Image (spheres, rainbow, N blue to C red):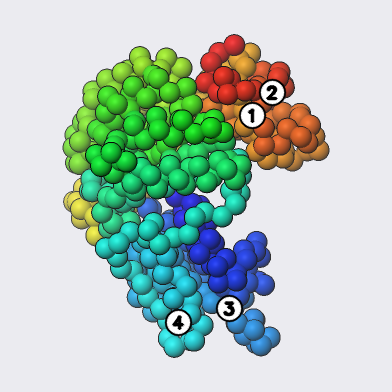
Amino acid sequence: MNVYDSARMVDVLVSLGFVSTERPDDADMVILNTCHIREKAAEKVYSELGRLRLLKEAKVRAGGRMILAVAGCVAQAEGAEILERAPHVDMVFGPQTYHRLPEMVARASRAAGAVLDTDFPADPKFDHLPAPGRAEARAAFLTVQEGCDKFCTFCVVPYTRGAEYSRPVDAVVAEAEHLTGAGACEITLLGQNVNCYHGEGPDGREWGLGALIRRLAEIEGLERIRYTTSYPADVDDELIAAHAEVPKLMPFLHLPVQSGSDRVLAAMNRRHGAGDYRRLTEKLRNARPDLALSSDFIVGFPGETDDDFRATLRLVEDVGFIQAYSFKYSPRPGTPAAAMPDQVEDAVKGERLAELQDLLNRQQLAFNEACVGRVMPVLLDRRGRRPGQMVGRSPYMQPVHTEASEESLGALVALRIAAGYANSLSGDVVDRAGPAMNAGNPA
Ligand code: SAH
């Protein structure tokens, strides 16, 4: 979502005459778009700000200037503290205020002290943001939902992104048409809790994510639809049916479970038990037999015993994930779990994480190896490192390398998978893939 948000900030700033650059040293303005989900992510901001201070000072000495801004969830959570710790910062603004950038930039340019905007405005920013600029790639992001009301006890999102909000169906469809018109053929629908989407439909009723996906699937030129991130307890029958009936919906679902222990899940306030999760994944696979799952895990949540952790390993074995993110529990300021008594020692967290990742990596490799011989539609959206090499994504988000002509850049191409590795596949071009090829069915 930060990638999407950054692109929308660029859209706003282009109207002020800015162009984006890859090099901070010649920039008139540098915006750090930040993440607060774990401590490590937040810490990076201050070390990066230290480096940028030197650039800014060099620029000022040379008679130029640089506006230094911190955006995103660290800005939202820490606010004025950033200005205290890093007084060379000119602007601090949270995720719900990007549409006010022109005004903030004007104020910072007049240099009348630093600008701080961490409001949650009543009218959503989406009403004020310009339409996205040129699609950067054939695969685009589109935020349909933002914020969260679930209050998992470990999580900062409800405090940084704010309350749950869904964009109206018409606005989402218009943006999707705009993106496909500009060349995108794959769209990933984004939300902190994307499957509790309940935007206002053209009929005045609330539409769920399943209905939204069916509507988007009607858009010509849009070949692949994905969505992330989902909350297990909010997967409803309408969404499961969409997986069964909408071929453009990719057979890959990121469904964070966090833990396999009911005790820990309850302490996390997750609203699903390990049994619920097992049943849900079974239902999804009955609807779409070639569906594969990925997940998120937290190890060392306060009070997690060795038995709790074993339950997580069992769940991983039972469900079989083809990909996953796993993290040591990181206490976040202001969240209930940070104040829970029995915090787990870091060394124990480290051991559990290594054991879990070892199992997850083996499952990932096994799946990648099992893909050998299959023909998969791959969206070749970038050049590989070697000349004549292209890289793209399979329906399952695996990076796939192939030898292909320059004209195939941006094309959806059928590849026969020749090898499966730890983190990628390689394959050989079979034929250009048409829309009928997008389902990723075994050959
Ligand atoms: N909406 C998703 C969560 C997205 S946040 C859900 O409901 O599952 C992305 C991931 O970061 C989470 O799934 C979780 O695994 C991890 N995470 C969030 N807070 C964390 C914390 N305090 N410590 C460690 N990992 C955390």
- Count residues near mark 4 (Cα–Cα under 10 Å), then give few for <14, some for 14-19, many for 20+: some
Residue farthest right in this picture: 387
- Asked if marks 2 and 3 touch (Cβ < 8 Å), the reply is no
- Count residues near mark 1 (Cα–Cα under 10 Å), then give few for <14, some for 14-19, many for 20+: many
- Asked if marks 2 and 1 touch (Cβ < 8 Å), the reply is yes
Q: Quadrant of the C terminus?
A: top right
For marks 3 and 1, the one nearer the N-term is 3
| Tag shown at residue 66 | 3
Query: In the rendered image, which residue does mark 1 sit on?
Result: 412
Q: Amino acid at mark 4?
A: Arg
Q: Secondary structure at mark 2?
A: strand
Total numbered labels? 4
For marks 2 and 3, the one nearer the N-term is 3
Q: How much space separates mark 2 and mark 1, taking CA atoms?
A: 7 Å
Residue farthest top in this picture: 443
344 over 74 or under it: above or below: above
Query: In the rendered image, which residue does mark 4 sit on?
Result: 107
- Asked if marks 4 and 3 touch (Cβ < 8 Å), the reply is no
Residue 120 location in percent, x, y? 29, 64
Q: Amino acid at mark 3?
A: Met
Residue farthest front in this picture: 203
- Which quadrant would residue 413 be assigned to in this image? top right
Judge whether residue 400 can be spotted in this image: no
Q: How much space separates mark 4 and mark 1, taking CA atoms?
A: 46 Å
Residue 310 location in percent, x, y? 31, 28
For marks 4 and 3, the one nearer the N-term is 3
Q: How much space separates mark 4 and mark 3, taking CA atoms?
A: 14 Å
Q: How much space separates mark 2 and mark 3, taking CA atoms?
A: 47 Å
Query: In the rendered image, which residue does mark 2 sit on?
Result: 432
- Asked if marks 3 and 1 touch (Cβ < 8 Å), the reply is no
Residue 193 location in percent, x, y? 32, 42
Report the mark closest to the observer, 4 or 3: 4
